[in-house]
Image (cartoon, grey):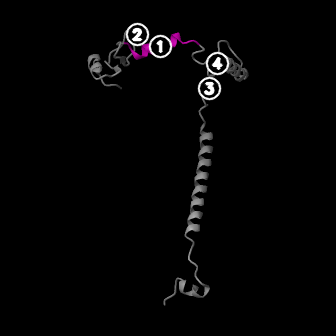
């Protein structure tokens, strides 16, 4: 877990957190802030209580799932009209199948690049031309 360290020692070392191994008054066994001595988990709980649904990215009233895109577009238009930077939702996390398809495409591109490099190398250093009358001397079993 964490190394046990006193608040004074953490302050001397300029650490933001320290860990006593003891429970806080609300029963959390977590790190504490060096500046205030408060429990980190208590801070998370307190912050969650004051967060409004809008702050959590939720709409203020229930919407049907088909209406989310339209409502988001409307909110973005309002933000732009008020001169604010519109909220842009995060990209969804790709699934395993999408990652596999993307990897397959990238591998194909790499192989194509390697083949193009081989072709360029052959064009720069073409094989030496051997006259047909000298081909017999180039055969594997020839002992001259």
In this view, the mark in front (2 or 4): 4
CA gap, disc 1 and disc 3: 25 Å
CA gap, disc 1 and disc 2: 11 Å
Residue found 35% across the figure and 20% down from its top? 17
Q: How crowded is mark 3: few (under 14 residues within 10 Å), some or many (20 or more)?
A: few
Q: Is residue 54 magenta?
A: no
CA gap, disc 4 and disc 1: 34 Å
Label 3 sits on a secondary structure element that is: loop
The quarter of the image holding the N terminus is top left
What stretch of residues is rendered in magenta? Answer: 38-52
Q: Which residue lies most toward the bottom here?
A: 144
**Which residue is label 1 attached to?**
45
Q: Main secondary structure of the magenta part?
A: helix
Which mark is first along the chain, 4 or 2? 2
Q: Is residue 44 magenta?
A: yes
Which mark is first along the chain, 2 or 3? 2
Image height of 66 relative to 39, above or below: below
Label 1 sits on a secondary structure element that is: helix
Q: Are marks 1 and 2 in contact (CB under 8 Å)?
A: yes
**Which residue is label 2 attached to?**
26
Q: Which residue lies most toward the front here?
A: 83
* Horizontal side of residue 78 vs 120, given as left or right: right
**Residue 83 numbered tag:** 4
Image height of 140 relative to 80, above or below: below
CA gap, disc 2 and disc 4: 44 Å
Q: Residues within 10 Å of mark 2 (few under 14, many from 20)?
A: few
In this view, the mark in front (1 or 3): 3
Label 2 sits on a secondary structure element that is: loop
**Residue 10 numbered tag:** none
| Residue 111: percent from left, percent from top | 59, 55
Residue found 47% across the figure and 13% down from its top? 45
In this view, the mark in front (4 or 1): 4
């Amino acid at each position: 877990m964490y190394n046990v360290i006193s608040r004074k020692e953490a302050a001397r070392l300029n650490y933001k957190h320290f860990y006593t191994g003891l429970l806080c008054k609300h029963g959390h066994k977590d790190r504490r802030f060096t500046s205030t001595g408060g429990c980190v988990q208590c801070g998370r709980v307190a912050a969650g209580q004051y967060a409004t649904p809008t702050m959590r990215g939720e709409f203020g009233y229930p919407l049907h799932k088909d209406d989310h895109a339209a409502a988001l577009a409307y909110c973005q238009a309002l933000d732009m009209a008020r001169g604010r930077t519109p909220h842009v939702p995060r990209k969804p996390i790709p699934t395993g199948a999408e990652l596999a398809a993307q990897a397959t495409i990238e591998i194909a591109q790499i192989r194509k690049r390697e083949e193009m490099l081989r072709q360029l190398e052959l064009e720069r250093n073409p094989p030496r031309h051997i006259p047909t009358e000298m081909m017999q001397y180039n055969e594997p079993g020839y002992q001259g």
